[in-house]
Amino acid sequence: PTVGSDAVENYKAIRRELEQYSKALAQKAEFIVANKIDLDPDAKIVKNLRKELGKEVIPISAVTGAGIKELSELLWQKVKETKAAAAQ
């Protein structure tokens, strides 16, 4: 996606491409991560994504590091849950 492009439309395009590639892969759990939140101080893009998609959106900034720790913890928790479920 390019700067200034519509985040919701970008998400939908990526999902369409994923479903065309593999229906099974498209059914897996997903994390929606919005980068560059430092460029959106009012969080309008993240709020709009949550509203339009009805899904949780994890805001981060690779430049400032905002949200990176929370994202890492969330991903690690999912890895542990997946491993535990596979072991049963």
Image (spheres, helix red, strand yellow):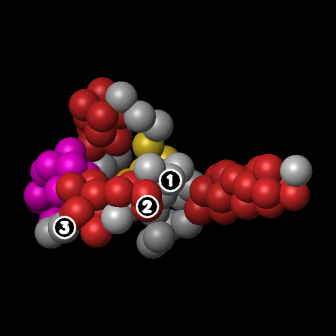
Picture residue at 74% right of the left edge, 55% below the top: 82
Magenta stretch: residue 8 in it?
A: yes
Q: Residues within 10 Å of mark 3 (few under 14, many from 20)?
A: few
Image point (43%, 61%), residue name:
25
Say which residue appears at 41% left-offset and 34% top-offset: 55
Q: Secondary structure at mark 1?
A: loop
**Depth check, front residue: 73 or 77:** 77
Q: Amino acid at mark 3?
A: Pro
Left or right of 50, for residue 13:
left
Q: Residues within 10 Å of mark 2 (few under 14, many from 20)?
A: few
Secondary structure mostly seen in the magenta stretch:
helix
Q: Are marks 2 and 1 in contact (CB under 8 Å)?
A: yes
Q: Amino acid at mark 2?
A: Leu
Which structural element holds mark 3? loop
Report which residue position mark 3 lands on: 1
Checking the image for residue 47, the label placed there is none
Q: Are marks 1 and 3 in contact (CB under 8 Å)?
A: no
> In the image, which residues are magenta?
3-14
CB-based contact (under 8 Å), mark 2 and mark 3: no
Name the residue located 34 percent from the left edge and 64 percent from the top edge: 22
Name which residue type carries label 1: Lys
Q: Quadrant of residue 17?
A: bottom left
Q: CA distance from mark 2 to mark 1?
A: 5 Å
Name which of mark 1 and mark 3 comes first in the sequence: 3
Report the residue marked by disc 1: 28
Q: Nearer the viewer, mark 2 or mark 3?
A: 2
Q: Label for residue 25? A: 2
Whichever of callouts 2 and 3 sits on the residue coming sooner in the sequence is: 3
Residue 81 rendering spot, x and y as whole percentages:
77, 50
